[in-house]
Amino acid sequence: MAEDNLILKRIKNGEIKAFETLFKRYYESLCRYGLTYIETIEEVEEIVQELFYKMWKSRENLEITFSVKAYLYGAVRNNSLQYLEHLHIKQNYKESVMKSDRINPPSPEEELEYKELNERIDKALDDLPERRREIFTMSRFEGLKYSEIAEKLNLSTKTIEAEITKALKELRKLKVE
C-alpha cells in the first residue's frame, strides 16, 4: 500500500502521529492473525506490542523493501513461531528435570546447599527497596508480565523494566561459592 510507505517515511523521521496511525491500522488484524498460531490473546498482544515497540525503537534503521503490511504480518508469524518454539523447549526442559529428579533425588548436601542459597536469595530480596522487591516478586515468582505489573501498580512499563534491571543487578552481586 503506497500510503503505508509514506507513513513509514514519516515514522523514520520520528513522527509519532504517523506511528500511531500505522499501529491503529494494523494492531487488531495482527492480533487476530497471531491467534492462528497462539491460543491466548494476552501472549499475542504481547508479541504484537513488542513488534511495534521494536519498530519504533529502530525506526531510523528500518528498511522495508516490500509492503509494510507484508512485513508486519511476516514478523507476527515469525515471532509467534519463535514463541511457540521457546514454550516447547521450556516444556521439554521441565519434563527432563522432573524425570532427572525422580531418578537422582538430591543428596542431603545438595538439599542443604539449596536451602542456604534460598536463604541468601531471600535475604537479598529483603534488602531491596520495597517497591523494587514487590515488582521483582510479581515478575519472577508470580509470573506476571511487565505490562500486567505496570497496570496493577499504576506505573509505566518502562518503570517496571528499570526496576527489574536494578533488582537483577543487585542480586547478581551475590557471591555464589
Image (cartoon, grey):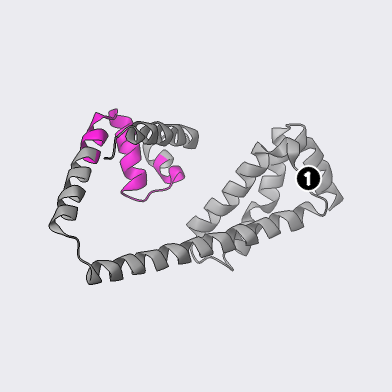
Of residues 132 and 8, the one nearer the viewer is 132
User: Residue at the spot x=63%, y=43% of the render?
Assistant: 54
Residue 166 in the magenta stretch? The answer is no
As drawn, the residue found furthest toward the right would be 2
Could you tell me what secondary structure mostly forms the magenta stretch? helix
Of residues 132 and 14, the one nearer the viewer is 132
Q: Residues within 10 Å of mark 1 (few under 14, many from 20)?
A: few
User: Residue at the spot x=63%, y=58% of the render?
Assistant: 76
Three-letter amino acid code of the residue under disc 1:
Glu
User: Residue at the spot x=81%, y=54% of the render?
Assistant: 67
Residue 72, horizontal then vertical, whole percent:
70, 54
Of residues 98 and 144, the one nearer the viewer is 98
Residue segment shown in magenta = 121-149
Residue 3, horizontal then vertical, whole percent:
83, 47
User: Residue at the spot x=38%, y=48% of the render?
Assistant: 144
- Tell me the SS state at disc 1: loop
Q: Quadrant of the C terminus?
A: top left
Residue 129 in the magenta stretch? The answer is yes
Count the labels in the image: 1
Of residues 154 and 53, the one nearer the viewer is 53
Which quadrant of the structure image shows residue 119?
A: top left
Circle 1 residue: 63
Residue 132, horizontal then vertical, whole percent:
34, 32
Which quadrant of the structure image shows residue 122?
A: top left
Q: Is residue 163 left or right of residue 24?
A: left
Which quadrant of the structure image shows residue 90?
A: bottom left
